[in-house]
Amino acid sequence: MSAVVTAREVAASVTDPELPMLTLEDLGVLRDVRVEDGTVVVTITPTYSGCPAMATMRDDLVHRLHDHGWDDVHVRVSLSPPWSSDWITEHGRQALAEHGISPPGRAPQAPTVINLLPPRRPVTCPRCSGGEVELISEFGATACKAMYRCTACLEPFDHVKEI
Amino acid sequence: MADHDSVYDGLLGSDDSQWAFGTDFEDPLAGVDTTIPSGADASTLGAYCLMLGDDALVYAHRLSEWTSRAPDLEDDIALANIALDLLGQARLLLARAAAADPGLVPELPADSPVPPEDALAFFRDEDAFRNVRFVEPDNGDFAVTIVRLLVFSTYRLALLQRLVSSTDAVLSAIAAKGVNEVTYHRDYAGRWFLTLAQGTDESRRRLLAALDIVWPLHDELFRAHPIEHRAAEQGVGVDPASVADEVDVLLEQVFGVSAVERPQVQPSGAVSGGTGRDGRHTEAMGRLLAEMQVVARAHPSGRW
């Protein structure tokens, strides 16, 4: 039983390649860690279908677990249920904000009409905490982020999108 | 030091994740139950997934051509992100097609490391592609791209929302992820449509011209192929005709706000009695595939 905890602790400490202030557990992509007959089976889920970081996550998990003496590691992908930004932990949200990235609000319900207005989110500037911000683009440097600018301190910043 | 601190780490040694045909998992469906649901037959499910996968693959490639050429950096990034989402959906759908019906996958040299979904993407000829012709034509100007993206993402979102209830657990899971992604694509296109319609005389002129360019292939989206019919009857798929009214209403809302009329143009006809779902494509398709496939075909056993 303690071995399970250890493997899980190792897996949970691996960081995300694109948001290195977050562990895979903080990001909510680490779904399960179990030990079956000496094999560690780790289940992760992609944030977006085309997330290019999955292979790096897999490699990092395998190498970290190898470093801690787990020779036989198997990483599986789980597609269902789909990842939601609601799965980012409270600790993860704090880490994002401390690193200048605005954490996501609540994930939206499935819309029925085409939203022709820019989305209104209660976003605050992660640098100056100002509430006056403007959306620059709904798509950012990675699939999971939008770009904002603070109209008080004028700094641009990333916002992790609700999904 | 974390492994990903150096991008060169994985290039040294024999790490098989860094090979020519992608750098992702060997099997994107590893650990996923790919049993064929009862009431469905494997060849129908495979052919149906191929259609949905080819729509996403071909359109992803087309949209990715905007990379480094969009009107501004934000839209460059947006279109690249949308293409990436669709490419991810394509990968899962083609992997699902290959798992359901391995007979779909082209034969490659015995030493080839190419996984089935890449063999489908890079080693099929034009007449084996089952995408709708709507996604093939050249991007045109930004207005043409936006009109096509609005129509396609509205259509695809309506399909994916229903496919969440597919009796195939894999297709259902792929659809559920896709719904979240395509909602962003549709809203992006809708906002730009309105902006172009209400922008300058020139942007409005281009938008109206774009509607006439895009519309002739619109009807084909909603004409069910026998495979789509059968997939719907078996509970794994959705009859595209069943989403036509909903898509129509959604587009009319955007047209109304934008003070734009629905285009009155003749639909493109069939070619030798067939359309994209039959493997009959537009002239643009061959050039698109040539660019997409040339490197893979030159190195069918390649690793790097």
Image: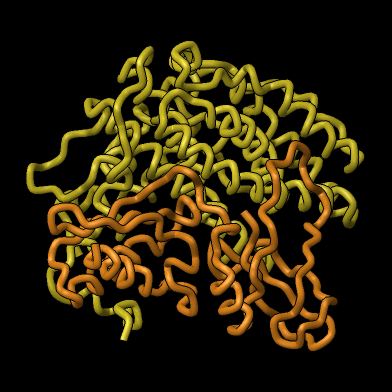
Chain colours: A orange, B yellow
Q: Can residue B140 be seen?
A: yes
Residue B10: percent from the left, percent from the top? Answer: 24, 73
Residue B301: percent from the left, percent from the top? Answer: 14, 52
User: Residue at left 13%, top 59%?
Assistant: A38
Q: Is residue B221 left or right of residue B196?
A: left
Quadrant of the image containing the N terminus of chain A:
bottom left
User: Residue at left 49%, top 65%?
Assistant: A27
Quadrant in the rendering for residue B267: top right
Q: Is residue B271 left or right of residue B76?
A: left
User: Residue at left 77%, top 52%?
Assistant: B192
Quadrant in the rendering for residue A88: bottom right
Residue B12: percent from the left, percent from the top? Answer: 17, 76
The answer to which of B275 and A33 lies nearer the viewer is: A33
User: Residue at left 54%, top 16%?
Assistant: B224
Residue A18: percent from the left, percent from the top? Answer: 46, 72
In this rendering, the answer to whether A163 lies above or below B163 is below
